Amino acid sequence: MLKQIKNITLILVLSYFSSISAAELKPVEMPILSGVGGNFSAVDADGKDIEFNDYNGKVIVIAFGYTNCADICPFTLGYLKSLYSKLSLEEQQRVRIIFVTIDPKYDTPGHLKSFIGHFNEDFIGLSGTQEQIDYIVSLYQAQYNKLSSVTVLTDYVRRVNPKEDTDKSEDKTSLYSHTVTLYLIDKDGFTRSLEYTGTPKDEFVTKIRVLIDE
C-alpha cells in the first residue's frame, strides 16, 4: 500500500512539472528600450546635486508623482514597498527605488524626504528646478498636466503626511494628472522594461533579479 502511495505521489509531481508551459520556462527577455531614459541632473532629498549616472552599477526603478497626489502615488509607493520587501537584503543593496516629483515648487527636498521615508527610508526622492524635472519627464517620454489653475488647501487633499512648519491656512497645492509607468533600468542606465502597479510582484521581482545578475 505504501509503495502504491509513493508511486501516485511521484506521478502527481511529474504531472505538475510537465504541465508547466514552454512560455513559463522561457528566459525573461528585456531588450534596451531605445529613446527612453538617459542621464540627467537633479537634487536628492538631502539637498545634494546628483547625476543619474551616479547610480550606475545599481538596478533602478523610477516612478513619477508628487507628494500631494491623492491616491495613485501613495498606492504606487505602497506597491514598491511591498515589491522591495520581496528582495533579499543583499539584493536590496544592489537596487535603488527612485521617486521623481513633477511638482518641485512644492516638493522641497526636506518635504520629499519625509514623504518618501513614510514608505521606506531606502527609497530616493528627486526634485530640482522645474526645468530639470521637465527634462527628466521628456527623457522618459512621460507626461504630467495641471488639472486646474486653481490651487486648493492641502487639508482638502487626502495625503500621506502634511508639510512641516507650514501655516495650514496658506498651505495650498495644485493637482496633476501624470504618467504612472514604472521604469526598470539596468546597471548601465538603460531602460529595459516598462511596468505598472498591476504587474504581478513576483514577475517584477524576477525581472529585477535578471538585471542584478547581468
Image (tube, rainbow, N blue to C red):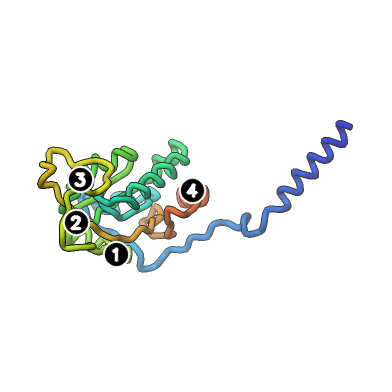
Q: What label sits on residue 143 in the rendered view?
A: 1
Residue lying farthest to the front in this orientation: 156
User: Which tag, 4 or 1, sits closer to the chain's start?
Assistant: 1
* Amino acid type of the residue that numbered disc 3 sits on in the rendered structure: Asp
Could you give the CA–CA distance between mark 2 and mark 1, rounded to whole angstroms?
A: 16 Å
- Tag 1, which secondary structure? loop
Using the rendered view, name the quadrant where residue 92 is placed.
top left
The numbered mark at residue 174 is: 2
Find the distance from the CA under tag 2 to the CA under tag 4. Answer: 32 Å
Q: Which residue is mark 3?
A: 155
Q: Is residue 41 left or right of residue 165?
A: right
How far, Cα to Cα, is label 4 from label 1?
A: 25 Å
Q: CA distance from mark 4 to mark 3?
A: 33 Å
Comes first in the chain, label 2 or label 4: 2
Q: Residue at x 16, y 56 (%)?
A: 151
Relative side of 104 to 77, left or right: left
Q: Amino acid at mark 1?
A: Gln
Closer to the observer: label 4 or label 3? 3
Tell me where residue 132 appears, x and y as whole percent: 20, 59
Q: Looking at the image, do the residues carrying marks 4 and 1 touch, with CB atoms under 8 Å apart?
A: no
Q: Nearer the viewer, residue 54 or 36?
A: 36
* Of the two numbered discs 2 and 4 in the rendering, the one whose residue sits closer to the viewer: 2
Q: Residue at x 15, y 53 (%)?
A: 105
Foreground mark, 3 or 1, reads 3
* Image location (x, y in percent) of residue 35: 35, 68
